Structure formats: structure tokens, C-alpha cells
């Protein structure tokens, strides 16, 4: 399996070059289906998370990468395509299958934007998956400066709360859950900045 091969062959090099500093790494040690949700800065983000996670992580990537040999390569890395600009039902179903099988699904719900801004389809999709599957959503925040300094820094938060959502409509549940996830990102950002 290409994922396993890359992970173990490149792990020593990763440790030497990036010298990862991760707070609350134990927060990734969850059982059963789970969603890792993280801010997105670089194409290296999923690689870093895959190296640090104690479990195999399945990711989405923009469909444009799945041309020619890219399809075989990314499939071997447990990545499947998504159309980021529409409600891609096929990709959401694929992600749901991953979660139902008790596996970990990784997503960057705000694309390459910062932790603020209007909701896009990925953010709505993350809320849908979380609420439909019941899988815990583990928020993570990567330091935007870490690739410049070549010192990878990340903080892992606690699962996003679903408390009080049961009395809301479907749309209200989705919006409120997304707001809670965004607030979790902002809280992790503040905590990480305070540790510098």
C-alpha cells in the first residue's frame, strides 16, 4: 500500500526536517469513525497529518488532480476526488462510507482561506457528515508560519460539541455546528499563538 510505504520510508526525514511540535497529540487517538478537521495552508498539510496520526487518514482532494497517473497515485494514498465548488454528493457518500467502516476521514473545511468568511460547500459538507454519521469531529490548527520556519507546529482540540442541536431544524443544525467548528479553530489559533 503506497500510503504505508510513504509513511514509514519518509517518516525519519520528516522528523529531521520539520521537527514537529504538536500539542495534545493524544486527541487524535480516537476509536471508530472520526473526522479530522483542520485549517489549510499548503499541499503538505495532509502529509503532515498522515505522518502524525496514529491511524490511517482518508482525504479528499480537488478532482483536477486525478488526471492520468494522478488517479492511481492519489488512490494509493487513500485520497478520493471532490468537486469543491458544488454539493458533490458522490464524494460525501464516499466519505460517509469511510466513517461507517470505522475509519478516519480528514478534511480541510475552509479550503485555503483563513478561519473566517462565508460558508462554502466544504464547510456545509463537513457539518453534514458530522451530523449524519455521528462521528466525532476533532479540530486541529496548523501554525501559518511553520512552513517558513521549517518547524511544524500544530494543536489538536477536543471534539466539537453537539449539545443542544437536537431541537434545531436541519439547516439550523448545520449552520450552528459549522459556527462551533469555526469557533474551535479560532480558539486553537489563540492557544497556539499564546504558546510561542
Image (cartoon, rainbow, N blue to C red):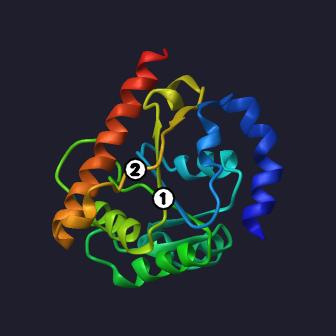
Q: Is residue 19 above or below residue 184?
A: above
Please say if 38 is above or below 76.
Answer: above
Residue 193, given in percent of the width and then of the height, sits at 42, 20
Secondary-structure class at tag 1: loop
Q: Label 1 to label 2, Cα distance in Å?
A: 7 Å
Left or right of 180, for residue 1: right
Q: Give the labeled residue for mark 2.
A: 160
Q: Position of residue 114 (x, y in %)?
A: 29, 41
Pick the front one: 151 or 25: 25
Specify few, some or many for label 1: CA neighbours under 10 Å numbering under 14, 14-19, or 20 or more: many
Left or right of 136, for residue 16: right
Disc 1 and disc 2 in contact, CB within 8 angstroms: yes
Observer-nearest residue: 170 or 35? 170
- The quarter of the displayed image where residue 188 is located: top left
Instruction: Indicate the quadrant where residue 104 lies.
Output: bottom right
Give whichever of 158, 188 is nearer the camera.
Answer: 158
Is residue 113 visible in this depiction of the protein? no
Task: Identify residue for label 1.
Answer: 136
Amino acid at each position: 500500500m503506497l500510503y504505508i510505504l510513504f509513511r514509514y520510508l519518509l517518516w525519519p526525514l520528516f522528523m529531521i526536517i520539520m521537527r514537529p511540535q504538536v500539542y495534545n497529540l493524544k486527541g487524535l487517538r480516537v476509536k471508530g469513525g472520526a473526522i479530522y478537521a483542520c485549517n489549510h495552508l499548503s499541499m503538505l498539510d495532509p502529509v503532515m497529518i498522515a505522518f502524525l496520526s496514529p491511524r490511517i487518514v482518508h482525504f479528499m482532494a480537488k478532482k483536477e488532480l486525478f488526471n492520468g497517473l494522478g488517479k492511481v497515485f492519489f488512490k494509493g494514498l487513500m485520497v478520493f476526488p471532490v468537486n469543491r465548488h458544488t454539493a458533490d454528493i458522490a464524494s460525501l457518500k464516499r466519505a460517509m462510507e469511510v466513517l461507517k467502516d470505522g475509519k478516519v476521514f480528514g478534511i480541510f473545511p475552509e479550503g485555503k482561506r483563513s478561519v473566517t468568511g462565508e460558508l462554502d460547500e466544504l464547510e456545509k459538507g463537513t457539518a453534514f457528515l458530522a451530523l449524519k454519521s455521528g462521528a466525532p469531529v476533532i479540530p486541529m490548527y496548523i501554525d501559518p508560519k511553520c512552513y517558513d520556519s521549517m518547524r511544524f507546529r500544530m494543536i489538536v482540540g477536543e471534539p466539537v460539541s453537539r449539545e443542544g442541536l437536537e431541537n434545531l431544524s436541519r439547516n439550523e443544525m448545520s449552520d450552528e455546528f459549522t459556527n462551533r467548528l469555526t469557533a474551535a479553530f479560532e480558539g486553537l489559533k489563540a492557544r497556539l499563538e499564546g504558546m510561542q
